[in-house]
Structures are given as structure tokens and as C-alpha cells.
Image (spheres, rainbow, N blue to C red):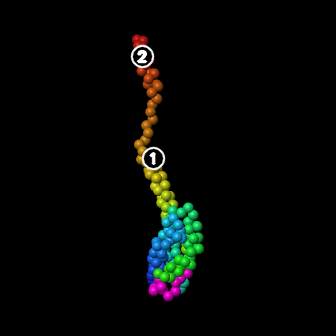
Amino acid sequence: MDSRRQLKIASLIKEAFTEILNKGGKNIYGKAFVTVTNATITSDLTLARFYLSIFNSQTPDEVLMQFNIHKHELRKQLAEKLRHHLRRIPEIEFFKDDTLDYVTKIEAVFSKISAEDAEIHNLKNAPPVEEKKPRAKKAAAKKAPKRNED
């Protein structure tokens, strides 16, 4: 459980990092759409972890690798933003946040189950199908005239 101080600092760092990405992030990750979904900080305040949601990219791992390549530059920009708030700027790590992909997958499974349940419900409540008598016998009986042999 994070302390109140950790939560405040993590929120401050997340806000500053989001602003950095909005202003100059396109140089790092290109055309991909990247959002910071969460930021955590260790209890000794020396390591900040950013969880990034990456969309509109064929290779999200490559985008994450670009963040790791530019880690020093990003930390320096973060230090400029937070120099009046923190004594020491923590080291930073980046992780891919797959929760939205997981949510999409789970919703697809639930919708499939719901559709199957609706289909089963419709089959149970359908009116019984009556068997139709073959018409050939009736037609043959009507064509043949009856003979009275009295």
C-alpha cells in the first residue's frame, strides 16, 4: 500500500510527464497514440514507473523501446518541470499497459456468451412445430370417386 506522500508525488510526476509527452512526445514515438495510464513511485522515492497505453502502432514494443532509448532526455525534462517540487528526481522505467486490450478481449467474450444465451432462450421459448400431414394422400383420396355398389 502506497503512502499518501507516494501517491501525491506519483500524481505530480504523472501530470508533469503527460505534459512533456503532449509537447514533444511525437519526436520519440512518432505517429503512435501514447497515454500515461498510471505512475507509481517506490517508497524511497528513487524510482518512478510509468505505465503507457500505446495505440495506433503495429509494434507497441518498438515504441516502448524508443522510450527506453530516450530515458535520459525524458528524465532531464522531468527534472526541469519538477525542480521546485522535488529535491531528487527519481530514475524512470516504462512499462506497456495492456489493461485496455484485456478489457476489450473480456468484453468480446461476454458478448459472445450473451449472444449464445439469447439464442438458447429463443429456442426454448419458440412455439412447437406441428407436423404437417402429407398432402399426397389427401389429394389421391379426393380424385378417386366413390362407388356405391348397393
Q: Residues within 10 Å of mark 2 (few under 14, many from 20)?
A: few
Disc 1: which residue? 123
Answer with the quarter of the image where residue 8 lies.
bottom left
**Camera sees residue 74:** yes
Q: Is residue 24 magenta?
A: no
The answer to whether 73 is drawn above or below residue 139 in the figure is below
Disc 2: which residue? 146
Secondary-structure class at tag 2: loop
Disc nearer the start of the sequence (2/1):
1
Residue 26, x across and y down, in percent:
50, 69
Q: Which residues are magenta?
A: 82-91
Q: Nearer the viewer, mark 2 or mark 1?
A: 1
Q: Nearer the viewer, residue 115 or 12?
A: 12
* Kind of residue indicated by mark 1: Leu
Q: Nearer the viewer, residue 86 or 130?
A: 86
Residue 86, x across and y down, in percent:
48, 86
